[in-house]
Image (cartoon, rainbow, N blue to C red):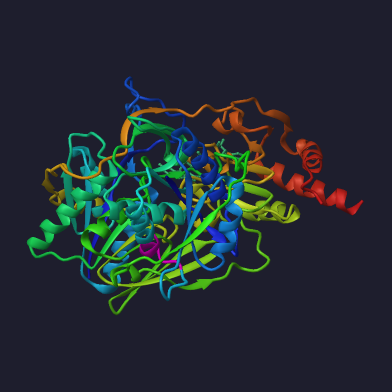
Amino acid sequence: MNILVCVKRVPETGGRVTLSADAREIDTRYLGFTVSPHEECATEEAVRLVEANGGSSTVLTLGPEAAADQLRAAMAIGIDRAILLETDGQDWDPVATAAAIVDAIRAEAAAGVQYDLLLFGNEAADSGDFQVGIRVAIALGLPCINGVKSLEIKDGVATARREAGGGWEVFQVPLPAIVAVREGINLPRYPSVPGRLRAKKKEIERSVPVARQAGAAGPEKIRLSLPAESEGRAEILGTGADAAPAVVDLLERIGVLA
Amino acid sequence: MILTFVEQAAGRPDRSSLEALTFARRLAAAQGVPLGAVLFGPAAEVAAAVLGAYGVVEAHLVEPAGLDAYAPAVWGRSVAQLVGASPPTVVLAAGTDRGQEVLAYAAAMLDAPMAANCIDVRPGEPFEVTRQRWGGSLLEKARLDGPVRLLTVAEHVTQPEEAAVPTTVSISRFTPTLSEADLRVRVIGRVAPEPGKVSLADARVVVGGGRGVGGAEAFSELEELAGLLHGAVGVSRVVTSAGWRPHSQQVGQTGTRIAPDIYIACGISGAIQHIVGCKAAKAILVINTDREAPIMSRAAYAVIGDLHTVVPAVSAEIRRRQAL
Ligand SMILES: Cc1cc2nc3c(=O)[nH]c(=O)nc-3n(C[C@H](O)[C@H](O)[C@H](O)COP(=O)(O)OP(=O)(O)OC[C@H]3O[C@@H](n4cnc5c(N)ncnc54)[C@H](O)[C@@H]3O)c2cc1C
């Protein structure tokens, strides 16, 4: 079984975000980078499926040269190959990103590599476009299931579940197929030291994607801003266990203590 | 014409779709064009009939032959073909799982751009939207070009509001032309929610635990408090990544969005990805040893102290009062 996982390098934000001077990017001078939790899980899922069924896994990203770090992180937990579609660091819109991924998959096919399963994160952590997997599916004529939190592959058929209204919806499609996963589908492993060392030595296959010329484009980013937040000061109800009566008074006042 | 994909269950439009319709009506008024809706599934006609209150003048009921179940490519194809039949300027949906998915299919099939989770739109040329990134902790102003523009409306931002003057809805039926490929992806089964369980998304009280809880066992303290308040336990990503609790309890950008009357956040620092999941709470009560924790600026109330002493003390106090 041949699996391709598509991931995106994003800044590892946590605390307050500041923007670059032109307000087009997050100021990343003091930040590390990672991939979205959804894609970490997609990567883990690929490794597990190959462990269980045999075959080979490949990770692909469209991003700057530095995104090689995220590809190595994927290889450190057991992904076999890595492909970097190298950009100059500008964000590509979801239409262009999908088109570049389609080109790369076609190039792989021309070189004799066919994928049974293409895994994506449901949406990238930063841009949250919710469409790259579906655009790739339509271009390649493949079925696509989104929001997946449980996946089973048997006899060339993928059975996937996603959360809906407190319960689950079940989908089933024949392979080859695209599955966009959500965090929670598995608990990703930590890379081992030998895994990291092996990944360091592995080759990363690089190419320069050609930007799409015709058809739709966008959304085209103009600038970023931080939402206006009503920041207040919390009323301190007390310190330590002595605060318990004040807390329960509050719960009674709000009406949650029936 | 502006077309809105309206989700409905048992003949009642979903709240998120009414938010999207309210957003769409304002856009339609700004552009001076009529507002249309597209609906699927059993009882769609019942749901369509009430949309006049929201200013809809035209509702398209899609009836894919022999298909009742949700099928994203079929629904997307139907929207795309409706657009082809009478080109609307803008197609909208709610920023729900299905809204994002159906619109992304339609956009891909039409080779048109789509902007997800918009909170504002400035029609005209250029056509500009303001949309959420990072789950809503960052905003992006962007241009959307093309003869047809698709956008989803971020949930919980626009209040659903009826039109000042209700309209009469003219209802028409539409049968899409489908290929075998469109039919491949569809819901083939459902697993019902566990009966009697308080779901995290709907809980009136959520007791949250973060790294400060320190390990899997100590969650019994939070479970006890949540039980006394008929609430649910929610956790930070540190907790699920450590395997202390299942991901189904994670609150945040890549977990569940909660909107309780009170969120009691214990040992949680308040990273932006956590905050976007709990900012719809009516009030946040923080229990933290650090009075400088970032979450303090989002909280209405706080107790400074070790959660392992504060939480059991609160539970004990509730019990003491209940016994009186
Ligand atoms: C793309 C992306 C997506 C993410 N999605 C999510 C998400 O969906 N949900 C989420 O939660 N996070 C998410 N994160 C992670 C997030 O950035 C933070 O790392 C995480 O929320 C921190 O969890 P925490 O508050 O439990 O831990 P910490 O930040 O370590 O905070 C622990 C807090 O506990 C307090 N404390 C310690 N001991 C005690 C004690 N005994 N009593 C009381 N207080 C104590 C400390 O003072 C501190 O404030 C995401 C990150 C990225 C990059």
Tell me residue B229's x, y (percent). Answer: 74, 52
Q: Nearer the viewer, residue A41 or A211?
A: A211
Extreme residue in the right direction: B324
Q: Quadrant of residue B42?
A: bottom right
Range of the magenta residues?
B70-75
Extreme residue in the bottom direction: A155
Left or right: B295 in relation to A152: right
Q: Is residue A162 magenta?
A: no
Total numbered circles: 0
Tell me residue B206's x, y (percent). Answer: 65, 49
Tell me residue B305's x, y (percent). Answer: 67, 35
Residue A75 seen: yes
Tell me residue A93's x, y (percent). Answer: 27, 41
Left or right: A110 in relation to B178: left
Left or right: B96 in relation to B201: left
Extreme residue in the top direction: A21
Q: Nearer the viewer, residue B116 or A18?
A: B116
Q: Nearer the viewer, residue B91 or A51?
A: B91
x 40%, y 67%: residue = B175
Residue A40 seen: no
Left or right: A100 in relation to B187: left
- Main SS of the magenta part reads helix
What is the quadrant of the N terminus of chain B in the image? top left
